[in-house]
Amino acid sequence: MHRTVSPWLLAIAIGLAAVPAAAQQRNNGITDTMFAAQTCSVCHGSASYISPTMPAIHGVPADTLYTALIEFKTDKRPYTIMGRIARGYSDEQLKALADYLAKN
């Protein structure tokens, strides 16, 4: 039996920032940034989810998030999984993601 994997689940599973244009059209205008933010939410949850190792990030100021993401990407802030995830995005994508998470 062959199963089709939804683009949304695929984006979460492998942490992609970019989803094919055809997938975007099928998802009623959901942007790449929104898909990426869903990936973040898997671990970081919402404002009601608090953990010392995976803090809630929604609503944190964009410049704080962006600085942290760049530090993860450049290994200035060592953290096993976040460094790997951040390296998968361009600086512009990380900025857009930080801006989105700060507002949502």
Image: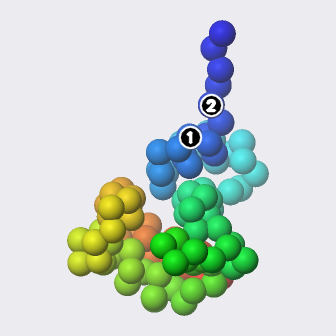
- Looking at the image, which residue sits at the far left? 75
Residue 64 spot, x, y in % from top left: 45, 88
Kind of residue at disc 1: Leu
Residue drawn at (48%, 73%), measured in percent from left and top?
53
Above or below, 100 against 20 in this view is below
Are the residues tagged 2 and 1 within 8 Å (C-beta)? yes
What is the CA distance from the residue labelled 2 to the residue labelled 1? 7 Å
Above or below, 101 against 37 in this view is below
Badge 1: residue crowd in 10 Å (few <14, some 14–19, many ≥20): few
Residue drawn at (71%, 56%), measured in percent from left and top?
29
- Looking at the image, which residue sits at the far top? 1
Q: Quadrant of residue 30?
A: bottom right
Residue drawn at (28%, 72%), measured in percent from left and top?
78
Give left or right: position of 11 versus 68: right
Give left or right: position of 8 versus 62: right
Q: Nearer the viewer, residue 66 or 19?
A: 66
Residue 86 spot, x, y in % from top left: 37, 64
Q: Quadrant of residue 50?
A: bottom right
Give left or right: position of 3 versus 89: right
Residue drawn at (60%, 58%), measured in percent from left and top?
42
Q: Nearer the viewer, residue 18 or 11?
A: 11
Residue labelled with disc 1: 10
On the rendered image, what quadrant is the C terminus found in?
Answer: bottom right
On the rendered image, what quadrant is the N terminus found in?
Answer: top right
Query: Between disc 2 and disc 1, whose residue precedes?
Result: 2
Kind of residue at disc 2: Val
Residue 65 spot, x, y in % from top left: 47, 81
Residue labelled with disc 2: 5
Q: Is residue 33 visible?
A: no
